[in-house]
Amino acid sequence: MTQYGICNLSLIPLRAEPSHRSEMTSQILFGDCFEILDEQKSWSLIRLAHDNYEGWIDTKQVTSINFDLYKEITHHTQAISDLSSHGILMRLGHDEMLHILPGSTLPLLQEDGLFTIDETDYMFLGLSINPDARNMSKEIEEVSRFYINAPYLWGGRSMFGIDCSGFTQMVYKHFGIKIPRDANQQAGEGKTIDFLQKSLPGDLAFFDGEDGKIIHVGILLNDSEIIHSSGKVKVDKIDENGIFSLEDQKYTHNLRIIKRLVH
């Protein structure tokens, strides 16, 4: 019988193997739901609902939920904590406080700021939004610039550390758009844009290595600027050759393809 869980902590590392020494491949934010596929000693193999990404987490960090709640949360767009403010959750009846990261999911949030997970009542203190893609082209620069100077972190998905595809995934989440976790997976989505001059704000640009494999992704702000996570989240110039680093004064990434994931 399939089991289901939810992240009720600020952040949980997702690892390639069942060990704290193993590579962190992604991060799970508060409110993210998952299926539990397997268990080994003190570790659980999970599959995330929003992008089908799989990995191992410490079983002590699993909060179980039933299928009905899992379905209700994952089949409808949920409110998320706004990027402009620091969010705090109060665990009612426990006299406990939990700091959550911007962009975290607030499952089944009510107008009064209350919601319940696994018989625990929460009150959200902060600003929340209901994701909406209709104004994405106008708001994409403001939303993506929230992460400016966030340090690069392999597997990261927060302003305290984020990788290139985690960055694009979190920005798109702000608009209620689910995209895969890794850059090569994201490159398989959407419509190909043949020329940089035909791109729109919010289109994704992908870059390859010497072997032709996709190794990097960023968000186009216009046809000559890109925001991406490389060392840190920053804005650089882009042309048909690729990314021209303003800091290094040289080309750093070879442009492979441009994709439009929002129609």
Image: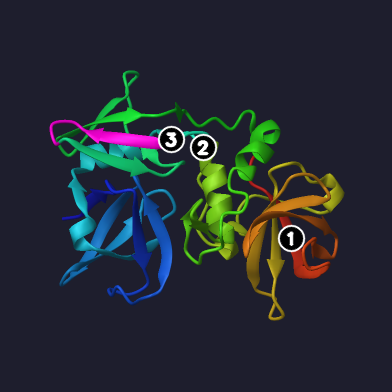
Q: Amino acid at mark 1?
A: Ile
Q: Amino acid at mark 3?
A: Ser
In the picture, measured across the screen, residue 65 lies left or right of residue 52, that is left
The residue wearing badge 3 is 81
What secondary structure is found at the residue carrying circle 2?
loop
Q: Comparing marks 1 and 3, which lies closer to the viewer?
A: 3
The residue wearing badge 2 is 83
Residue beneath the point at 65% across and 37% down: 142
Q: Which mark is residue 257?
A: 1
> How many other residues sit within 10 Å of disc 2, few (<14), some (14-19) or many (≥20)?
many
Residue beneath the point at 68% across and 40% down: 141
Residue 225 at what x, y percent from top left? 79, 50
Q: CA distance from mark 1 to mark 3?
A: 32 Å
**Residue 88 is a magenta residue:** yes
Residue 181 at what x, y percent from top left? 50, 58
What secondary structure is found at the residue carrying circle 3?
strand
Q: Amino acid at mark 2?
A: Leu
Image quarter in which the C terminus is found:
top right
Question: Is residue 77 at all visible to an observer of this figure?
Answer: no
Considering depth in this image, is 21 or 53 the residue closer to the camera?
21
Q: CA distance from mark 3 to mark 2?
A: 7 Å
Q: How many numbered badges does the structure rendering display?
A: 3
Residue beneath the point at 22% across and 43% down: 67
Q: Earlier in the sequence, mark 2 or mark 1?
A: 2
> How many other residues sit within 10 Å of disc 1, few (<14), some (14-19) or many (≥20)?
many
Considering depth in this image, is 66 or 12 the residue closer to the camera?
12
Residue beneath the point at 59% across and 43% down: 146
Quadrant in which residue 104 is drawn = top left
Q: CA distance from mark 2 to mark 1?
A: 29 Å
Magenta residues, start to end: 86-94
> How many other residues sit within 10 Å of disc 3, few (<14), some (14-19) or many (≥20)?
many
